[in-house]
Every structure is written in structure tokens, then in C-alpha cells.
């Protein structure tokens, strides 16, 4: 899944197969079933996904690997690494992470074009600055890693704000089945994202 290279060629700890084995039993129960969003606040999330806020997410602390390996695992689960549209998405996830202390990959990356951050599922633009990105090491918000850091994770060292990291860092994953997201409850984006502090 890594541009034609085998896992062994690219990563020192290729354990995607082990990851898939670990969740295989659960996954086998869920696929092929119909999924739907009702008019209530309840989604029908197929295993191994569970409802987090208005989304179906799979957050697994025991699985970790490079960004591309974790995206591959999500794809095997008919999802993608999670996207964050606004502060509500971030808050829903943080409410759900009971044991902190590890980083989680998101779908944000600037692999194709340095400095142009997109979500992996649909290539839509990642909102920059507040409220998603953190600034743990300087007065300026990430991303600041240039060509060395092209993948974004929720950073345990900065209250789980987004930070850019080298894509071969080993972090856990949050997958999302976006085909069952409820219609969003019209957030006023002007209010949520009015701050543009960078540059
Ligand atoms: Ca970059
Ligand atoms: Ca960084």
C-alpha cells in the first residue's frame, strides 16, 4: 500500500498484518451489514466502529505504526484516518479517549504538496490555525516541520491539538467511517474558526 513498496522495504517494524489479525475477529462480524443514520442522535456503527459524537470511529490504542500503515488499516476497515472539521469534532474525540498518553494519527497530511494540508479521505483542505493546531514548541502554531513532517497527529504533549510529525513516526490510529456521518448540525464556521493567528 506504500506506493508499490513492500512493508519490509519501507518500515523497520511492519506489523500491519498483526494489527489486522488482532481486530480480524471483530471486523468479520460487521462488514456487509447495512448501516444507516436515523433521525435520532443514535448512529448504527458497524463493528469495530462505535459512535463518538456524530461519527462512527474506531479508536485503538493497542495498534500503532507509521501514518501510511495506519491509513492502510483504516482502509481495510472501510474507513480512513479521521478528519476534523471543527472544534466539536476534536472535543468529541477527546471526551472519548479515556487513557491518554499516546499520540493518534489523523488523516491530515501534506505529502503531495509541501504546505498544502488535505484530509486523506477526500483531499479537502485542512483548516489551519485555531482551533485545531497547537504550538507547543514556539510562539507559532504548527505545522512547522517543512518537508520533514508531512503527517498530522493529535499530540499528547500539547493537549491533543494537531501537530505535524514525520510520517514514519509510530502512533496509534483513529479510523472513521465517513459514509455514515450524520448531517452536520449547522455549525457557524465564522464563529468557530474566526481566528487566523498565523503569519
Ligand atoms: Ca510538511
Ligand atoms: Ca511539528
Image: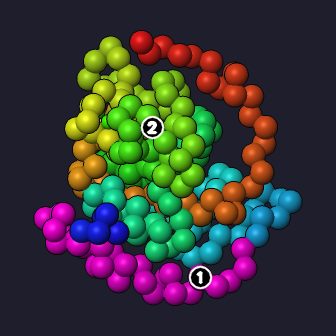
Q: Is residue 26 magenta?
A: yes
| 151 to 3, vertically: above or below | above
Q: Is mark 2 within 8 Å of ligand 1?
A: no
Q: In which of the image's four quarters is ligand 2 placed? A: top left
Q: Which residue is mark 2?
A: 117
Tell me the CA gap for discs 1 and 2.
32 Å
Q: Is 81 placed left or right of 92 in the picture? A: left
Percent position (x, y) of residue 131? 53, 27
**Depth order, front residue of 80/60:** 80
- The magenta stretch is 6-35
First-in-chain label (1 vs 2)? 1
Q: Secondary structure at mark 2?
A: loop
| 85 to 133, vertically: above or below | below
Nearer the observer: mark 1 or 2; the answer is: 2
Image quadrant in which you'd find residue 35: bottom right
Q: Is 125 placed left or right of 23 in the picture? A: right
**Depth order, front residue of 147/57:** 147
Q: Residues within 10 Å of mark 1 (few under 14, many from 20)?
A: some
Q: Residues within 10 Å of mark 2 (few under 14, many from 20)?
A: many
Total numbered badges shown on the rendered structure: 2
Q: Secondary structure at mark 1?
A: helix
Magenta span: chief secondary structure? helix
Amino acid at each position: 500500500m506504500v506506493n508499490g513498496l513492500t512493508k519490509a522495504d519501507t518500515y523497520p517494524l511492519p506489523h500491519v498484518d498483526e494489527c489486522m489479525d488482532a481486530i480480524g475477529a471483530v471486523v468479520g462480524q460487521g462488514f456487509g451489514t447495512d448501516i444507516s443514520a436515523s433521525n435520532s442522535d443514535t448512529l448504527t456503527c458497524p463493528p469495530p466502529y462505535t459512535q463518538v459524537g456524530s461519527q462512527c470511529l474506531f479508536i485503538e490504542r493497542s495498534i500503532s505504526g507509521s501514518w501510511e500503515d495506519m491509513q492502510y488499516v483504516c482502509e481495510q476497515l472501510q474507513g480512513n484516518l479521521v478528519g476534523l472539521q471543527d472544534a466539536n469534532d476534536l472535543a468529541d474525540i477527546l471526551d472519548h479517549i479515556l487513557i491518554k498518553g499516546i499520540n493518534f494519527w489523523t488523516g491530515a497530511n501534506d505529502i503531495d504538496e509541501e504546505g498544502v494540508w488535505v484530509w486523506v479521505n477526500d483531499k479537502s483542505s485542512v483548516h489551519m490555525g485555531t482551533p485545531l493546531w497547537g504550538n507547543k514548541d514556539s510562539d507559532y502554531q504548527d505545522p512547522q516541520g517543512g518537508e520533514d513532517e508531512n503527517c498530522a497527529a493529535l499530540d499528547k504533549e500539547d493537549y491533543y491539538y494537531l501537530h505535524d510529525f514525520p510520517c514514519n513516526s509510530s502512533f496509534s490510529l483513529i479510523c472513521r467511517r465517513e459514509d455514515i456521518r450524520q448531517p452536520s448540525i449547522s455549525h457557524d464556521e465564522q464563529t468557530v474558526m474566526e481566528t487566523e493567528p498565523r503569519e
